[in-house]
């Protein structure tokens, strides 16, 4: 069947930015298809379907795309929110750590775009929004694999935008600074509370970390007609961190 509502597919919808992004699309009358690595235990939410999927798995993406095609026949917006972050410098980052970041942050985004593209082509003026990081744009200590994998998303976004413009599909990315999510919580383990609080204040001219919904609002803007003349861009949502 073909849904009368616009449909957004959001990876990593179970927490953090992905969860807030799902909410803002639902609040704007979208049907939302979310993916999560673990089984979703939430109660039924109107207009929200969740699928458990390993975003690094080629076969699982092929199967999910087939399910979506049979059930909805199109996708209007794809948001690649799922991602991972571990600390580590050149000496402490193992090959497993390096592969873990690239498999999830880069290959996972690639596979989502590859398998959902036929469904995006069936929509009118569809859009892809990828999750980069402010660390895609500037260096950062002790996050070598994460920063490098996220910088790949900037180039991926720009290149894909050029390839897909002929299909009337826009591709953009957001580059969040420190956002109050479970991923940031793991970063706190590397510092004392005093060190963490000082770094967050000092790194962001606004003087605080961001909220997931503040990034979700920019994602929704990039998916909407309000940004119809924007493609191939990576937009910092970072409390001014990129101008430090």
Image (cartoon, rainbow, N blue to C red):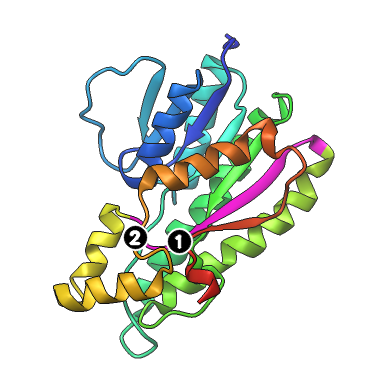
Part of the protein shown in magenta: 167-179
* Residue 15 x, y percent position in the rendering: 30, 43
Picture coordinates of residue 95 (x, y %)? Answer: 38, 78
Q: Name the residue rendered at 59%, 38% in the picture.
A: 221
Mark closer to the chain start, 2 or 1: 2
Tag 2's secondary structure?
A: loop
Where residue 97 sits in the image (x, y, percent)? 35, 72
Asked whether the residues under the numbered discs 2 and 1 touch, taking CB atoms below 8 Å apart as contact, a structural biologist would say yes
Seen from this angle, which residue lies furthest front? 206
| Foreground pick, 131 / 180 | 180
Asked whether, in this view, residue 62 is left or right of residue 57, the answer is right
Residue at left 43%, top 37%?
21
Q: Read off the residue under disc 1.
A: 239
Foreground residue, 61 or 105? Answer: 105
Residue 66 vertical position relative to residue 222 in the rendered view, above or below: above
Crowd band around label 1 with a 10 angstrom C-alpha radius: few (<14), some (14–19), many (20+): some
Tell me the quarter of the picture where residue 41 sits. Answer: top left
- Image quarter hosting the N terminus: top right
Q: Secondary structure at mark 1?
A: loop
- Of residue 40 and residue 52, the one placed in the foreground of this image is 40
Q: CA distance from mark 2 to mark 1?
A: 7 Å
* Residue 63 image position (x, y, % from top left): 48, 32
Q: Residue furthest right?
A: 166
Vertical placement of residue 84 versus 166, above or below: below
Q: Residues within 10 Å of mark 2 (few under 14, many from 20)?
A: many
Magenta stretch: includes residue 169: yes
Q: Residue at x 51, y 65 (%)?
A: 150
Residue located beneath label 2 in the image: 209
């Amino acid at each position: 069947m073909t849904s009368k509502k616009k449909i957004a597919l959001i990876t990593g919808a179970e927490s953090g930015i992905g969860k807030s992004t799902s909410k803002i699309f639902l609040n704007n009358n979208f049907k939302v298809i979310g993916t999560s690595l673990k089984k979703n235990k939430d109660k039924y939410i109107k207009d929200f379907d969740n699928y458990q999927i390993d975003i690094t798995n080629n076969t699982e993406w092929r199967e999910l795309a087939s399910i979506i095609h049979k059930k909805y026949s199109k996708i209007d917006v794809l948001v690649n929110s799922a991602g991972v972050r571990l600390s580590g410098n050149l000496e402490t980052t193992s090959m497993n750590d390096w592969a873990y970041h690239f498999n999830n942050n880069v290959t996972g985004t690639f596979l989502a775009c590859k398998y959902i593209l036929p469904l995006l082509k069936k929509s009118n003026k569809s859009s892809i929004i990828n999750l980069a990081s402010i660390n895609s744009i500037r260096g950062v200590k002790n996050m070598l694999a994460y920063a490098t994998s996220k910088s790949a998303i900037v180039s991926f976004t720009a290149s894909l935008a050029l390839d897909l413009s002929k299909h009337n599909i826009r591709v953009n990315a957001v580059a969040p600074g420190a956002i109050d999510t479970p991923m940031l919580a793991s970063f706190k383990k590397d510092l004392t509370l005093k060190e963490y609080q000082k770094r967050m204040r000092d790194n962001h001219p606004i003087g605080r970390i961001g909220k997931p919904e503040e990034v979700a609002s920019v994602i929704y803007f990039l998916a909407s007609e309000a940004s119809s003349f924007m493609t191939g861009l990576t937009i910092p949502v970072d409390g001014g961190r990129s101008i430090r």
